[in-house]
Amino acid sequence: MSPVTPARILDQLALPVWLIDPADGAVLWQNPAAADLARGRSIEAMRRGPLSSGAHESLAALAGAGPVEEVWTVGSDPAPQALHCLCRAFAQEDGRTALMVEGCTEPSIGPVAAPGPADALFRQALPPMLILDLDAHGRVIDANSAAEALYGLDRGSLMTRYFWQLDCREQQVLDDIESALRVDTGPWGGSCLHRAVGEPSKTVEMHVSPLSRGDPSRVLAVLIDVSDDRRLARNLMARQEELERLVETRNAQLETARRGAEVANEAKTNFLANMSHEIRTPLHAIFGMAQLIRRDGLKPRQLERLDKLDVASRHLADVITSILDLSTIESGNLNLSEETFDLNPMVRRVMSMLEGQAIAKGLSFVCEVSTPEVTLQGDATRLQQALLNLTDNAVKFTETGGVTLRAAVEDEDASSLSLRFEVQDSGIGISAELMEHLFAPFEQADNSSTRAYRGVGVGLSITRRIARLMGGDAGGWSEGGQGSTFWLTVRLKKALPVLDAAWTDAGRAEDVLRRDFSGCRVLLVEDDLINREIAMLMLAEAGQFFDVASDGEQAVMLAARHDYDLILMDLQLPRLSGQDAARRIRELPNGRRVPIIALTADVLVEDRESCFAAGMNDFVAKPMTFEVFCRTLLRWLAGRRRLQLSAE
C-alpha cells in the first residue's frame, strides 16, 4: 500500500499551492493545479498583473509580514483571471524560510494559523478535507483543522468515525463513491447533508479523488459548506414567491378596482345619456313649439312672455349640453371631428347668435376680424362652442358699455394656421386671484346661493379643454370693475375651399327652401307624439311634403315603397332602432343614395359615431332652432339635386 504523504494529498487538490523562494521568486514546489495556472509565467509577473493587488513591494517583505492576502493575476490574455492568494512564511527543514501561497476563489475570513511542519500544508488548507479508507467501510484516517471546525470534533474523534456516520445518507454515500470511482478514476462530486455535533445538518458539496492509482481505496474528500448559500437561496426563493403572490394579489385587486371603475363610469355615462334624452325630448317640444307659436303673430305682451320662455328653454339646453360635454371630456372619450369649414362665416354665426341679447341690454357688439378668407379643417362645432362660451359670458356679465370679439392669425405655415380669439367686455371684472379658478369645473367667481348671474360654472373649463385638444390654450385677465378679456388659441389645418356651399346662401335658408326646393318628399321617423307634431309643422313651414313613420320597421317599409329626397330619423324607436333601420334602408335598391339625417336627443360621442357607422349622413341634436332645421334640409336637398344633375 502506497504511503499517504502531504505532497500526495496536495497534488489532489483543485486549489493551487506554491512554495516560493522569497529571495529570487523561484518556485521550490507546486502542485499540478498551481502549475496549470502559472503556465510558465513567473511569480513576479502574476503578482504584478493587470488584475493584481498587494501592498508589499517584494516577496521578502511579504514573507516577513505574517499571513497576508493578495490578489494575483493568472491565465493568459485576452481573458486573465483574478486569484485570491493566502501568503505566509513557511519554515523549511534546512532552516531557511520559504513563502507558501495557497490560491482560492474567495478571500479568507478570520485569523490564519501560524505555519507548522511539512504536514501543516494539509492541516492548514482552507477547505475541510478528510482522508478515507473505503476498504475499511469509509473509516476516517485523517482530517485537517477545517474539517474539525465543520463537524465540531477534534482530529482524534474524527479518526474514530466512519464517513457514513457523518453523512445523512449513511451507507448509500459510500456505495455512490465506490460506484463512481470504479467507472472513472477521476474526481467524483455530489451534494449531501452532513451532521455536525450539536448543530442542524449542513449542506455540503463533496469532491472525492483517489490518492493513488495503485491504491484506489484511499481517497481524499474535499468538503465545501454551502449551507449558508443554500439557506440564502431558499430564503430568496421564498421571498420571491411571496412577492409574486403579493403582486398577483395586488394585480387582482387593481383589476377588480379597474372593472369597478369601468362599470361605474359606464353606469354614469348611461345615466347621463338617459337623463339627456329624457330632458331633451320634452325640451325640444317646448323649444320648437315656442318658435312655431312666434310665427303665428302675437300681441306684444304675448311675445314678451314667449321671449322669457325662449330664454329659459335655451338656458336649460345650455346647462344640459355643458354637463354632458364636461363628462365626455373628463372621461377621455371626446374625439374631435375633421370637417371642412370657412372661418369667417363661423365667427359671424357666433356674433349673430348673441347679437340680439346684446342689443336687448343696450350694449355695443363689435367684431374685429383680421383673418383671411380661409378654409380650414377641424371640429368647427367645438370651436364655435368655445367661442360662444366666451362671448356669452361677456354679454351676460356686462351691463353697460360693450363687447368686442377679435380674431387674428398668430402664425402660419404652408399647412396650418395658429389662430387667436379674444373677447373683451366692460363688465364687472374679476380679481386676479380668482381668475384661474374660473377654468376649473363648476367654479364661478361667485359660488354663493345669492349670486346674481345664472350658470353651472363649466363653460370656461370646457373651453380650455377644447382649446388644448386643438393644440392651443385658453385664459384671461381682468380687474375688478374694469372689465375682462378672455382669450383662446387653436391650431388648425388648412383645407381646400368648400365646394358644396349652397346651404350657406346669403338669403335665409327658409326662403331658399321655399323658392328652390318646395315640394320635396321627406320621410319623418319619430315616435314621440309632440316632437313628431313639431317636426311636421316645421316641414310644412319649409314647404316640404312628408310621410310619417312611428317606428323603425314602418320606416323601412315606407322607404322600400317610395323614393324620398331626405329621411329624418330618430334613434330610440320601437321595434327597430334608428341605426338598424338606416342599415336596412341602405340595403334597398332605392335607399343607397338618399340622405339620412339623425334627428335625436341622444348626443353623446358614441351616439354620433354609431349613426355614421350605420350609414347616416348627418347628426342634428334636439332641441334645435327652426333656422338650424332649415339649414340642414337645404344643405342635403341641394347636395342631392346636384348629384342628380351631374348623373344626367
Image: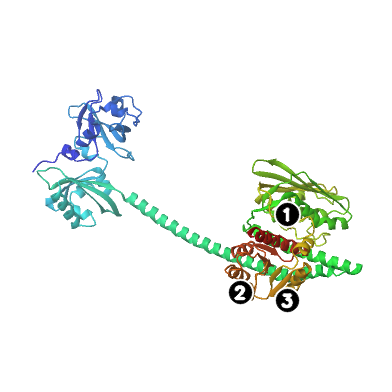
Image disc number at residue 392: none
Q: Is residue 202 left or right of residue 535?
A: left
Dot label at residue 384: 1
Q: Nearer the viewer, residue 198 or 398?
A: 398
Using a 10 Å C-alpha cutoff, classify the residue at mark 1 as few (fewer than 14 neighbours), some (14 to 19) or many (20 or more): some
- Left or right: 20 with respect to 434? left
Q: CA distance from mark 1 to mark 3?
A: 32 Å
Amino acid type of the residue tagged 3 in the rendering? Leu
Quarter assignment of residue 448: bottom right
Give how far across and how far down residue 97 sits, in percent: 23, 27
Residue highlighted by disc 2? 576
Identify which amino acid the numbered label 1 is placed on: Gln
Residue 555 placement, left or right of 385: left
* Residue 628, quarter of picture: bottom right
Which residue position is annotated with label 3?
A: 529
Q: Are marks 1 and 3 in contact (CB under 8 Å)?
A: no
145 or 556: nearer the viewer: 556
In the rendered image, the residue lying farthest to the right is: 300
